Image (cartoon, rainbow, N blue to C red):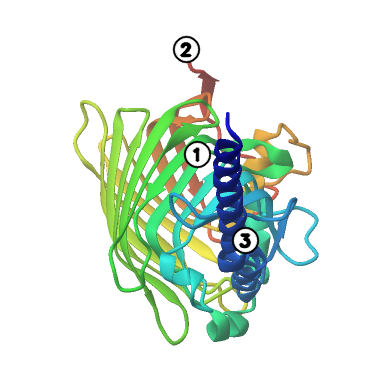
């Protein structure tokens, strides 16, 4: 190669390296990952949560502006157990966010997140309603959300839901929101949930209107519910859902669910009404006690001091499957003042084949 050729090659390489360095500098200056990390942390703080990253955020510009997040932890201040832990996350940003102070979100993706239902429940119940009413808002996501291989765990990290894959559309107050969820229960039975709702933010809280639930369980039980939900913070939660349940070779059954917000001297209460050819139920349940009781049963930590939740109503079921336990001819009548130390009603039990 001649001296002139070497000079041309050197000049081309120098320009290429310069452009590469300029591009990397542009990415850093435009994206400024610490700005978007601070934005995400501020959004979490507005909800009474702490967001931590195991490693500094990594910016990328192509094929779209994005921030790579490694080792996410979302927890309530001072809590011993985080609400959410994820190995990896990606926040895709709109191009305008590069040149504006406000950092919006175009797409959110989480890989292998784990949600602790006990920690989540504690945070919700400890969140003051008056604080929520002043700072509540819904995050705006322009394109959608994807979650891969997630899990929901309860007491002592026992799995409730596993292999969760969630795909959701854009999230905007006042616009219909669509969500598809698929996974398995603790007994490895598959389920699929399709949810449609209209989120809205009012003066005092968040409401989900025009809710449509379509749940398929074990590929043979199909549930369709319609209703609404309102949350004003803490235990001030109300829910109304009603619809039908379809089982193989059985007439359609009616199902109604209602959540009554906590009031002075009364905890949060959950009403369930079921009317079908295979059974009837009219139950008033305390969800806090039910979740704790069920978690203890799942972890095999049953002790003589374990008591039934303080619930009331009646239940009659020809057959009932709870996990890998099969019940037949079940009938329960619980008085309003039922003693928490009363023994459970008799029922024939056995393992499913």
Residue 242 shown left or right of residue 55 in the figure = left
Which of the pair 104/82 is nearer the observer?
104
Q: Is residue 88 visible?
A: yes
Residue 166: x and y, percent? 43, 44
Q: Residue furthest top?
A: 353
Residue 314: x percent and y percent?
44, 49
Residue tagged 3: 25
Residue neighbourhood size for the residue with mark 3, other residues' Cα within 10 Å, grouped as few (<14), some (14–19), many (≥20): few
Among numbered discs 1 and 2, the one appearing first in the sequence: 1
What secondary structure is marked by label 3? Answer: helix
Gap in Å between the C-alphas at discs 1 and 3? 32 Å
* Residue contact at pointers 2 and 3, CB within 8 angstroms: no
Q: Does 159 appear above or below 41?
A: above
| 112 left or right, relative to 50 | left
Q: Can you identify the residue that label 1 sits on?
A: 148
- Residue at 80% from the left image edge and 65% from the top image edge: 78
Q: Secondary structure at mark 2?
A: loop
Across and down, in percent, residue 286 comes to 56, 58
Residue 152 vs 348, above or below: the answer is below
Disc 1 crowd, CA 10 A, few/some/many (<14, 14-19, 20+): some
230 versus 114 height, above or below: below
What residue is rendered at 47% in x and 51% in y? 62
Residue 320's disc is none
Which quarter of the rendering shows the N terminus? top right
Of labels 1 and 2, the one closer to you: 1
Q: Mark 1 falls on what kind of element?
A: strand
Residue designated by label 2? 353
């Amino acid at each position: 190669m001649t001296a002139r050729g070497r000079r041309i090659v050197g000049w081309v390489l120098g320009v290429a390296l310069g452009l590469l360095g300029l591009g990397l500098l542009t990415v850093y200056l435009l994206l400024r990952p610490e700005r978007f990390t601070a934005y995400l942390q501020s959004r979490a703080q507005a909800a009474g949560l702490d967001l931590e990253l195991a490693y500094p955020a990594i910016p990328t510009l192509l094929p779209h502006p994005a921030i790579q997040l490694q080792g996410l932890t979302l927890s309530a201040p001072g809590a011993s157990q985080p609400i959410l832990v994820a190995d990896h996350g990606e926040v895709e940003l709109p191009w305008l966010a590069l040149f504006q102070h406000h950092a919006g979100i175009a797409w959110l993706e989480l890989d292998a997140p784990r949600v602790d239902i006990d920690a989540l429940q504690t945070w919700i119940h400890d969140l003051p309603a008056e604080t929520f009413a002043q700072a509540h808002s819904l995050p705006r996501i322009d394109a959608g959300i994807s979650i891969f291989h997630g899990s929901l765990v309860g007491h002592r990290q026992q799995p409730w839901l596993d292999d969760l894959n969630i795909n959701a559309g854009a999230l905007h107050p006042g616009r219909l929101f669509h969500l598809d969820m698929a996974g398995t229960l603790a007994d490895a039975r598959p389920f699929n949930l399709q949810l449609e709702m209209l989120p809205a933010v009012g003066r005092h809280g968040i409401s989900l209107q025009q809710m449509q639930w379509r749940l398929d369980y074990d590929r043979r039980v199909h549930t369709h519910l319609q209703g609404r939900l309102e949350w004003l913070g803490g235990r001030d939660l109300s829910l109304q859902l009603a619809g039908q349940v379809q089982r193989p070779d059985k007439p359609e059954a009616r199902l109604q669910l209602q959540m009554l917000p906590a009031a002075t001297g009364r905890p949060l209460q959950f009403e369930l009404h079921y009317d079908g050819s295979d059974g009837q139920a009219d139950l008033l349940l305390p969800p806090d006690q039910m979740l704790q009781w069920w978690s203890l049963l799942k972890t095999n930590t049953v002790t003589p001091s374990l008591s039934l939740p303080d619930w009331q109503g009646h239940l009659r079921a020809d057959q009932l499957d709870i996990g890998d336990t099969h019940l037949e001819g079940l009938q329960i009548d619980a008085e309003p003042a039922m003693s928490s130390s009363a023994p459970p009603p008799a029922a024939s039990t056995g393992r499913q084949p």
